[in-house]
Amino acid sequence: AQKITQTQPGMFVQEKEAVTLDCTYDTSDQSYGLFWYKQPSSGEMIFLIYQGSYDEQNATEGRYSLNFQKARKSANLVISASQLGDSAMYFCAMRSSGYSTLTFGKGTMLLVSP
Amino acid sequence: EADIYQTPRYLVIGTGKKITLECSQTMGHDKMYWYQQDPGMELHLIHYSYGVNSTEKGDLSSESTVSRIRTEHFPLTLESARPSHTSQYLCASSGGERSGGYTFGSGTRLTVV
């Protein structure tokens, strides 16, 4: 069984600062993928970043980077230089090899203040 | 420009009514999914499909049903809506990317009164 844990219900950060959103996962599979999605108040889900379990380097996409620590089973999202538009819910998700369905965590609400 | 479309965006309907939430994608993806999400909460998989004439129930028990007669179309139906069905319903598809990540629709916010 797969499980995603996001322990931070809410995070506050000031504009232009960096913030780390935590995500730990549990799986017995060796091959899996980890995802982060952003959900603004409008409700749509926006893909941010992907990390494969066999990828040797941490994934980066613009201001987003994924701090992947395989031994600790963590996949934290780092947002550099926060912007007001980053205020949203952020969901960590996992897909195991052989399955196409994603399992989501409970999410973290990020609020960016001026 | 969205490649996966959900209609309606918002729906308020009375108890006992039959409703169909539409989801269509233009990417030719084989795999499609329906998730249910209460406000500010996690997403729960309720149905998925690996292709035409293939449908499976997800992790969360749901009174809804789905069909997949065409690759691009994956509608969700509630035969008799109840207030407990009030939620957001998100449709997604996957297929081309190495990661297997989803492309989501904009969602349907359903309120049953």
Image (spheres, coloured by chain):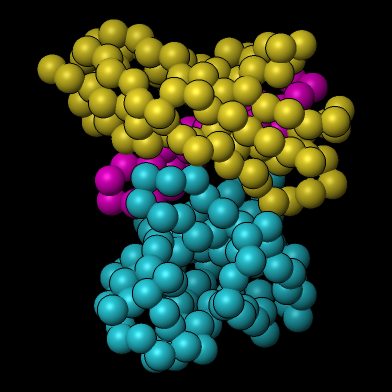
The foreground one among B50 and A6 is A6
Q: Residue at x 68, y 57 (%)?
A: B59
Q: Residue at x 30, y 83 (%)?
A: B13
Q: Name the image quarter holding residue B26.
A: bottom right
Q: Quadrant of the C terminus of chain B?
A: bottom left
The answer, for residue B14, to whether it is visible in the render is: yes
Q: Position of residue B66 (x, y in %)?
A: 62, 79
The foreground one among B7 and B43 is B43
Specify the chain shown as yellow.
A
Q: Position of residue B96 (x, y in %)?
A: 67, 51
Tell me if residue A6 comes above or below residue B89 in the rendering.
above
Q: Quadrant of the N terminus of chain B?
A: bottom left
Q: Position of residue A23 (x, y in %)?
A: 57, 23
- Single out the residue that lies furthest toward the left: A114
Q: Is residue A78 magenta?
A: no
Q: Residue at x 73, y 73 (%)?
A: B55
Q: Is residue B18 shown left or right of residue B44?
A: left
Specify the chain shown as cyan.
B
Q: Position of residue A55 (x, y in %)?
A: 74, 20
In this picture, which residue range is highlighted in magenta? A33-57
Tell me if residue B62 comes above or below residue B70 in the rendering.
above
